[in-house]
Image (spheres, rainbow, N blue to C red):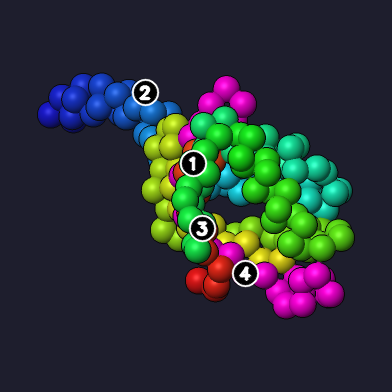
Amino acid sequence: MAKLRVLFALPLMMCGALLMPHMAAAEDTGPGPRKAGIMARLHEVEQALARGDDAQKIAKMLYAENVLMVGEGEEKSSKGMAKATSDVQGWLDSLGPNGGKTCKYSIPDPVVASATTFSSFVLLHCKANPPVLPEDQELRMMYSWEKSVQGWRVVLEMWAPGKF
C-alpha cells in the first residue's frame, strides 16, 4: 500500500513542480507590475520637468501620437501630438519659470490593467511659484495608457483642477 501511495504521489509532485513557474508568472500579471512601470514613466517625466526639458520632449515622453485630451472648462477636446505639445507648453507657462521642477505624480488605487492597457486616476501636485503660480497646483486626471513599441504612452486624458 505504501508503494502504491508513492507511485501516485510522485507524478503529482512532478506535475506540481512543472506548473510552479507558470503559477508564479501568473501572479505577476496583475496590475502591480504595470503600475510600477507606469510610475517609472511618470518619474521620467518628473525628471524631464526638473531638468527644464521643452514641451515637445515632455509630450513625446508622455503621450501617444493619437492622444485625445479633455480638460474641465475646455470648449472641446484636443487630439494628436501637435496639440498635446501646444497644451504642455501652455501648462508649463502657467507654472512660471522653473515651475515644473516641483511637480510630482501619484497613482491612487484602484487601477485597471491588462498586458497592453492601463487605466487609473493620476494626481499631479506642483508647488506654488509666485508670482506666476501663487498657490500650489493640484490636478486630478484620468489616464488610459497603451503599451507600444516606444513603451507606455497616454492615449486618453481627462483632467480637472482639485484634490482627490
The reply to whether callout 2 and callout 1 are in contact (CB within 8 Å) is no
Q: Counting other residues with Cα less than 10 Å from the Cα at mark 2, is it few (<14), some (14-19), or many (20 or more)?
A: few
Give the spatial CA distance, label 2 vs label 3.
Answer: 56 Å
Left or right of 127 in this view: 70: left
Q: Nearer the viewer, mark 2 or mark 3?
A: 3
Check whether the beta carbons of the residues at disc 4 and disc 1 lie within 8 A of each other.
no
Residue type highlighted by circle 1:
Leu
Query: Which of pointers 2 and 1 indicates the residue nearer the eye?
Result: 1
Q: Which residue is mark 4?
A: 138
Image height check: is 87 above or below 147? below
Residue in the foreground of this view, choosing between 128 and 44: 128
Measured as percent of width and height from the top left, residue 24 is found at 42, 36
Q: Which span is picked out in magenta?
A: 127-153
Q: Which mark is residue 68?
A: 1
Q: Which residue is mark 3?
A: 74
Quadrant including the N terminus = top left
Mark 1 or 3: in front is 3
Choose mark 4 or mark 1, whichever is in front. Answer: 1
Nearer the N terminus, badge 2 or badge 3?
A: 2
x, y percent for residue 78: 52, 44
Which amino acid lies under the numbered mark 3 shown in the image of this protein?
Glu
Residue type at numbered disc 4: Glu
Residue 145 visible in the current orientation: no
Residue 8 percent coordinates (x, y): 19, 25
Q: Per the image, is 132 magenta?
A: yes
Q: Secondary structure at mark 1?
A: strand
Identified at 68% across, 41% down, the residue is 85
Q: Nearer the viewer, residue 65 or 116?
A: 65
For the point 70% across and 53% down, the residue is: 90
Q: Residue furthest front?
A: 75
Residue 134: x and y in percent read 77, 77
Element class at badge 4: strand
